[in-house]
Every structure is written in C-alpha cells, then in structure tokens.
Amino acid sequence: MEKTKGLYKTISEVAQEIGLRNKKNKKLSTHTLRFWEKHFKQIKPKILSGNRRYYSQKDVDYLKLIYSLLKNKGFTINGAKKALNDPSLKLDDTLFSGVNKKNFGSTIKIKAGKIKNIIKKIKKSN
C-alpha cells in the first residue's frame, strides 16, 4: 500500500501534529502513541510490513481527544477510557478548548480534590 498524501499519516507525523515530545530531549514521543494504541480500542492504525503504522484522520482525531483528556484535563487512562466509551458524554471538539459547560463539573471535581489534599496537608503540619 502506498501512502496517499493526506489520507494517512505516519506515527511521526501524528506525534508532531499532536505535540507529543519528550520533555528532556525534545524528540518526538512516538512510543506514547504505541502505548495509547494498546489501551484505547478506538485507535486502529493500519500496520504494514516492518510494523510501520499509518493513521487515518479518525485515528488522529481520537488521539487528539485522548491527549486533551490526559494532558490538559487531568484524566487517568481508565478515566479517559470511560469517557470515550460512555455515549451519554457526547465528547466533541469542545473538549479541546478550555473549561466549558460540558466538562465544567469534572474540572471542578478535580480542582476540589486537589484543594482538599492541600488542606489535609496543612492541617497535618499544624
């Protein structure tokens, strides 16, 4: 299969587009994409000879959403899986932006939990 320009993207192209870089050496973090493939059934790249991966636009969209849930919204892997598998949660492009009415409740819960932990630490130290 020849890679049609724009139809499929390589793992490096996807990592670049999402912004996945190693914090220490700033190299593309393609291993993160392979890890996410194992944990999220929605990601189904075409794997050709030599284990070369080609991602469709649908895969890239899911990966961007997963990145947003994990890195920007503070979800765990299991939390992101539940969010992606729950049809009542109508996940869409609004999750890529800041806090909005669709994810306001979960954002507040995360922040409230962090504040509670800080208060507990302060009480213990006094």
Image (tube, rainbow, N blue to C red):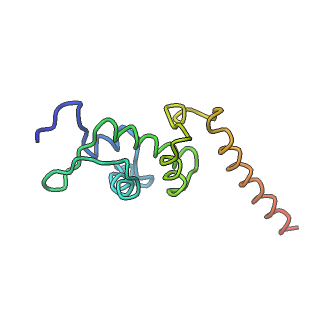
Residue 98, percent from left and from top: 60, 34
Instruction: Provide residue 80's location: percent of width, then percent of height.
Output: 51, 51
Q: Quadrant of residue 76?
A: bottom right
Q: Position of residue 61 (x, y in %)?
A: 39, 37
Image point (23%, 49%), residue name = 53
Q: Residue at x 72, y 54 (%)?
A: 113
Residue 18 in percent (x, y) is at: 40, 40
Is residue 114 positioned above or below 99 on the image?
below
Q: Quadrant of the N terminus?
A: top left
The residue sitting at 71% across, 54% down in the picture is 114
Residue 36: which quarter of the image?
bottom left
Which quadrant holds the C terminus? bottom right
Drawn side of residue 1 relative to residue 102, left or right = left
The residue at 27%/47% (across/down) is 45
Q: Is residue 120 left or right of residue 98?
A: right
How many numbered callouts?
Answer: 0
Q: With 14 as the anchor, is 22 left or right in this view?
A: right
The quadrant in which residue 72 appears is top right
* Residue furthest front as drawn: 88
Decide which of 31, 75 is in the foreground and name it: 75
| Residue 123 as seen in the image, left or right of residue 45 | right
